[in-house]
Each structure stands twice: as C-alpha cells, then as structure tokens.
C-alpha cells in the first residue's frame, strides 16, 4: 500500500478500557486532539473514577472539561451516558456480537456510529472504521466511498474494506493523508503517491495545467 510506504504502518495497541474511550471520544467532538486530551486529563484529575463523575453536579464536570470547548453540552452528555450505564464498564462489548455491540453504543445519549466505532476499534481491536472528516474526504476522493455519501452510511460501506485491510491502519493512514496532503481546499495532488489512482486528482488535472 503506497500510503503505508509514505506514512509508515501504524499498529493498534488495544487498551480494553471502553468507558475511557467512550468519554474521550465525546470530549473530542468539535475540538483539537490537544484540547481533547487536556480536558480528559483534567477530568480524571478532578474525579477519582467514573462513578464520581456520574454522581457529581453537572457544573463540576463542566468546569473540569472547560478547556476542551462546548463544555456545557459535553458535560451533560457524559453525565447522561454514565447515568444510563450505571456500573456497567462495557467490557462485555469485547465478546458481544458486533452488530449488537454497535447498536447498544448507538442507543446511548448523543452517541453515533463514529463514537461507537472508536470504542470498538480502539478499545478491543474489533473490525470497525471510524469515519471522521479526513477519512470521509480522502475515501470519497479516491473512489472508496460514493460521492456525497453521508457519514452514517459511510460507516456501513467502509466495513467492506475490513476483509482486505487492517481497519486501524486503513483509518489512520487516511487521516494522515488528509491532514498532510489531501487537504480540503488545496490538495497537494502533485506530491500524492496515489494521484494516478484518484478520480478526483484526474478531474482536477486540466485545471492545474492552465
């Protein structure tokens, strides 16, 4: 795979802490990785465990994660999730039928397919492909996903690639490519190792040649 040669082969270290991953992914919404990690670290410093977060006033949770942005919304969402789960640590998701595990997560307050995919892939190494804006953009440009496909449907369609590609590697390499070369506004097609395979690059070639 050419992207692997360019960016290296990422390797997943599944951590088997699904509740941690779930909260971390909620904190990642509409913010940078740095702010997400800082908000998560401050949340864990403030509270001894997830039960303490569940039982704390929402204002205290909000104050702890303020640096991550959208703190009022995220605090309420995290509290609602933890209250729904009670003492369930979600470790049973490792062995549950994949469809059931996915459906259970998506039934939690404010949780969609991307977050569910993150939990199942990063915590347990289960065959899911989280579709963020970078993965969606690069995959559609390369013709791996249909043009104008929605994010929810894209998750279902991306599953077909897990039979031939490691899902974690597929996810990470498309993110790296989207961040470094295949930008939203000005993709660096002239430096792209897969430009000859990319329908979008071929379509843009005449305009670049002017």
Image: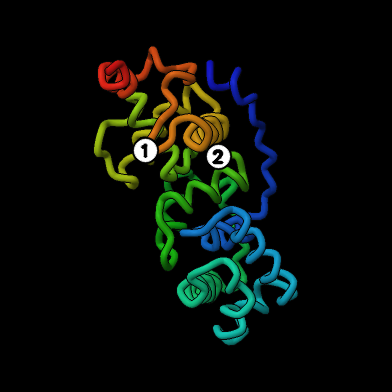
Q: Is residue 201 left or right of residue 109?
A: left
User: Vertically, is 43 above or below 197?
Assistant: below
Residue farthest toward the top in the current orientation of the protein: 196
Percent x, y of residue 86: 57, 73
The reply, left or right, for residue 131 in relation to residue 17 is left
Q: Which residue is mark 2?
A: 126
Q: Is residue 23 visible?
A: yes
Q: Residue at x 62, y 63 (%)?
A: 89
Gap in Å between the C-alphas at discs 1 and 2? 33 Å
**Total marks drawn?**
2
Q: Which mark is residue 185?
A: 1
Q: Is residue 99 above or below residue 72?
A: above
Residue 146, horizontal then vertical, whole percent: 27, 31
Mark 2 surroundings: few (<14), some (14-19) or many (≥20) residues within 10 A: many
Q: Position of residue 136 (x, y in %)?
A: 38, 38
Residue drawn at x 63%, y 66% is 39
């Amino acid at each position: 795979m050419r992207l692997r040669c360019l960016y290296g082969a990422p390797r997943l270290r599944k951590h088997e802490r699904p509740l941690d991953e779930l909260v971390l992914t909620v904190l990642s919404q509409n913010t940078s990785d740095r702010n997400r990690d800082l908000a998560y670290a401050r949340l864990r410093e403030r509270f001894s465990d997830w039960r303490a977060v569940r039982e704390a006033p929402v204002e205290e949770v909000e104050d702890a994660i303020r640096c991550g942005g959208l703190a009022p919304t995220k605090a309420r969402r995290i509290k609602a999730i933890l209250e729904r789960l009670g003492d369930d640590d979600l470790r049973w998701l490792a062995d549950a039928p994949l469809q059931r595990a996915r459906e259970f997560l998506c039934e939690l307050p404010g949780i969609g397919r991307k977050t569910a995919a993150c939990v199942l892939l990063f915590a347990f190494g289960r065959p899911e492909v989280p579709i963020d804006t970078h993965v969606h953009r690069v995959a559609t440009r390369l013709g791996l996903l249909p043009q104008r496909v929605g994010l929810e449907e894209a998750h279902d369609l991306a599953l077909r690639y897990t039979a031939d590609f490691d899902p974690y590697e597929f996810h990470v390499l498309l993110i790296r490519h989207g961040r470094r070369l295949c930008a939203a506004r000005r993709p660096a097609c002239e430096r792209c190792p897969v430009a000859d395979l990319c329908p979008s690059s071929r379509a843009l070639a005449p305009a670049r040649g002017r």
